[in-house]
């Protein structure tokens, strides 16, 4: 008898993706829904189920926000996830909810070498943590920490909400512009989809230009098309600031096991990103440059990595319950 598939979901601020996972963690029937087209997460889940002929009894949802309470509020979405209500509504016998970057981190070891692009060469230290970090609607971070007894533990963090540390007057101008609306300027205000818009708008204001775009995707599309010089400058600054932020996170966590970049933005701008100042700013840490230059950096290209990771975490929980 074929084992019943599990439901896995990756719920972000912009998109909700659902898929089925088999006993080996292989993903199929992936569907993506725009969050703004549904009043609730339940509505998006209903849409997925209406397209399927199966009703899984076990599920893992990866949520873009801190998973600390039975009712989870998404950081960049009006949706909420009431764990007990969701379990009851869809009849889940097993229902696991995790942070989205915890799921992404869990998926890293399941990916093939071809699922990554090398950003920076280096030599990973096997006993040190690995940092999984990346911009999407927000700015997520998690650590993969090796255990002395074997295996690993994954620590999701809210490192995207540490303060933005500008390096020069141009970056100070970006901070001042954002601070008009947000007195505390976190990294997520600059290194995310919304951050791209903030950088672009601040450049327009500085140059006395009328801002033409109000979404990160529109800025990115114009930059890639070469149709807007300010958009191109915004993306260049975005990549540089991401390098600075990722390097700071390595210093803060000791992540000499390497850095894995995820999120929805970077694969779409891969060629531009790989030519950017990311590596320069990543390594530019003064007396700690030698420490940074040893750290390898890879970019995830597989768009279902978090779904794969959700399947891994669900199987681990089920296995633990059976012991």
Image: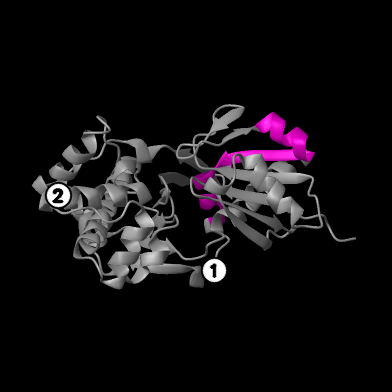
Crowd class of label 2 (few under 14; some 14 to 19; many from 20; radius 10 Å): few
- As drawn, the label of residue 316 is none
| Nearer to us in this view, 173 or 141 | 173
Q: Nearer the viewer, residue 190 or 57?
A: 190
Q: Main secondary structure of the magenta part?
A: helix
Query: Do the residues bearing badges 1 and 2 touch, measured as CB atoms within 8 Å?
Result: no
Q: CA distance from mark 1 to mark 2?
A: 35 Å
Q: How is the image coloured?
A: one colour
Question: Measured along the vertical axis of the image, is residue 55 above or below residue 175?
Answer: below
Q: What kind of element bears circle 1?
A: loop
Q: Is residue 193 left or right of residue 81?
A: left
Q: In percent of the image, x 70 and y 57: which residue is there?
A: 21
Q: Earlier in the sequence, mark 1 or mark 2?
A: 1
Question: Which quarter shows the N terminus?
Answer: bottom right
Region of the chain picked out in magenta, as a range: 83-107
**The residue positioned farthest toward the left in the image shown:** 169
Indicate the secondary structure of the residue bearing disc 2: helix
Q: Residue at x 31, y 47 (%)?
A: 195
Observer-nearest of 181 and 154:
181
Q: Which mark is residue 112?
A: 1
Relative to 321, does residue 228 appear above or below in the rendering? below
Tell how many labels.
2
- Where residue 187 sits, quadrant-wise, is top left
Find residue 263 and report its horizontal and vertical position in percent.
44, 54
Quarter of the rendering occupied by the C terminus: top right
Is 148 colored magenta in this rendering? no
Is residue 148 among what the camera can see?
no
Give the percent coordinates (x, y) of residue 34. Answer: 55, 52
Residue shown at the point (25%, 40%) measured from the top left: 164
Circle on res. 286 = 2
In this rendering, does residue 64 appear at all?
yes
Where is residue 145 drawn, in percent x and y?
47, 45
């Amino acid at each position: 008898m074929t084992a019943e598939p599990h439901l896995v979901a990756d719920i972000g601020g912009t998109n909700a993706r659902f898929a089925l996972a088999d006993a080996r963690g292989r993903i199929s029937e992936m569907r993506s829904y725009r969050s703004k087209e549904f009043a609730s997460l339940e509505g998006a889940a209903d849409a997925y189920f209406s397209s399927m002929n199966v009703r899984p009894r076990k599920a893992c949802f990866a949520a873009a926000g801190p998973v600390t309470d039975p009712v989870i509020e998404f950081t960049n979405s009006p949706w909420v996830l009431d764990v007990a209500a969701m379990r009851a509504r869809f009849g889940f016998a097993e229902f696991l909810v995790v942070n989205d970057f915890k799921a992404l981190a869990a998926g890293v070891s399941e990916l093939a070498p071809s699922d990554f692009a090398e950003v920076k060469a280096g030599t990973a230290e096997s006993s040190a943590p690995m940092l999984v970090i990346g911009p999407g609607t927000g700015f997520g971070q998690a650590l993969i920490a090796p255990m002395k007894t074997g295996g690993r533990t994954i620590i999701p963090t809210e490192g995207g909400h540490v303060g933005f540390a500008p390096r020069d007057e141009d970056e100070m101008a970006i901070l001042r512009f954002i601070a008009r609306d947000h007195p505390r300027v976190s990294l997520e205000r600059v290194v995310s989809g919304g951050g791209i818009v903030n950088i672009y708008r601040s450049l327009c204001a500085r140059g006395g230009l009328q801002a033409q775009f109000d979404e990160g995707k529109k800025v990115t599309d114009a930059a890639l098309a070469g149709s807007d010089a300010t958009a191109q400058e915004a993306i260049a600054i975005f990549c540089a600031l991401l390098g600075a932020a990722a390097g700071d996170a390595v210093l803060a966590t000791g992540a000499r096991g390497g850095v894995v970049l995820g999120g929805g933005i970077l694969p779409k701008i891969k060629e531009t990103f790989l030519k950017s100042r990311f590596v320069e700013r990543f390594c530019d840490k003064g007396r700690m440059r030698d420490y940074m230059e040893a750290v390898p950096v890879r970019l995830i290209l597989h768009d279902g990595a978090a779904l794969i990771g959700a399947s891994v975490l669900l199987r681990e929980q089920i296995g633990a319950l059976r012991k």
